[in-house]
Image: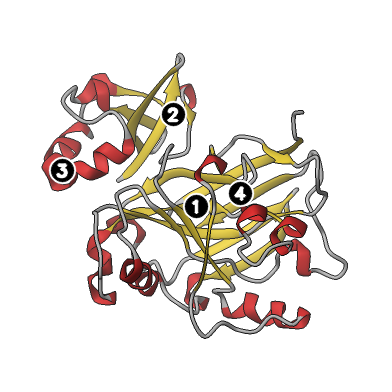
Amino acid sequence: MKLATFSQNDVTCIGLAMDDRMINLSIADPDLPTEMIALLEAGDAVKKALEKSVTNVKASIPLSAVKLEAPVLRPRKYLAIGLNYESHAAEAAKVGLKKPKHQIWFNKQVTCINGPYDPIHLPSVSDQLDYECELGLVIGKRCRHIKRDEAPSVIAGYLICNDVSVRDWQMRSPTATLGKSFDTHGPIGPWLVTPDEIGDPHDLDLRTLVNGEIRQDGNTRDLIFDCYQQVAELSTVFTLEPGDILSTGTPEGVGALMEPPQFMKEGDVVRIEIENIGHIENTVIREPV
């Protein structure tokens, strides 16, 4: 299934994306939750209702008639891992960064969440705006102390993340959080794809294009710490909750490490594609002040 959050006529709903159609779940079954985290928290109790909704013709509307929003509008946590592709670690070694022995995590403050096709801001305080193509996973069950082989059972699905980064602000403190959390710098989507439609999350092609030019072209086979290891590591420390987003790392080709560096500018269009999910695409605009 492709679980989506969408708006139509100033009303925001959740639905099922089906080819060129959207099934409005509020119409298909008024008893279903009306917000993504609540739907995930309901778990198996709503599975049959969701499956039945697929065939509800009255609830079907053209996909072109809706605005896709971030699938999870208000996650409790948005965490991202650093230097987690072999290729990215290799390019970062050129500027003195070492391949990590342990997982390196930082927060993206949840106010950065942005829609899959909404503009991203070029900050007024920096011209070092960069992209990072990442597979994101979304937690589906409240969990703690999850072992690696148990991790698939707590993952609700996968989506695309652009871990937009402001490099000078990222480097001005050890935590990286400031440079990762500017408003609009967390575009995600276009929907949450359930694991049965993803296949092996560790064998997905992914790439970034800026103004049609391929900048990143990789595969999740290149992950240093895989998705399930990431869930195990974090759940050792704290409770993961439905709707939490984990952004799993980026391959080589970030703008900051090109020679010379290639940062995004006003008017640039950045598109991120991941196999079995689709794409998100965002235009860079000057930050409103």
Q: Residue at x 53, y 70 (%)?
A: 219
Quadrant of the image occupied by residue 195? bottom left
Question: In the image shown, does 79 or 173 lie closer to the viewer?
Answer: 173
Horizontal side of 195 relative to 207 (left or right) equals left
In the picture of the structure, the residue carrying the numbered disc 1 is 160
Q: Please, is residue 39 above or below residue 165 in the view?
A: above
Q: Earlier in the sequence, mark 4 or mark 3?
A: 3
Which percent across, then down, holds residue 261?
A: 84, 64
Q: Which residue is mark 4?
A: 181
Cα–Cα gap, marks 4 and 2? 30 Å
Question: Residue at horizontal 37%, vertical 75%?
Answer: 229
Q: Residue at x 22, y 63 (%)?
A: 153
Marks 4 and 2: which is nearer the front? 4
Mark closest to the chain's N terminus, 2 or 3: 3
Marks 3 and 1 sit apart, C-alpha to C-alpha, by 24 Å
Cα distance between the residues tagged 2 and 1:
19 Å
The x, y position of residue 207, in whole percent, is 60, 61
| Category of crowding for the residue at label 2, using alpha-carbon neighbours closer than 10 angstroms: few (below 14), some (14–19), many (at least 20) | some
Q: CA distance from mark 4 to mark 1?
A: 17 Å
Mark 2 vs mark 1: give the one in front: 1
Residue, disc 3:
47
**Residue 285: in sight, yes or no?**
yes
The image quadrant that residue 137 belongs to is bottom left
- Using residue 160 as the reference point, say whether residue 87 is left or right of it: right
- Residue indicated by mark 2: 63
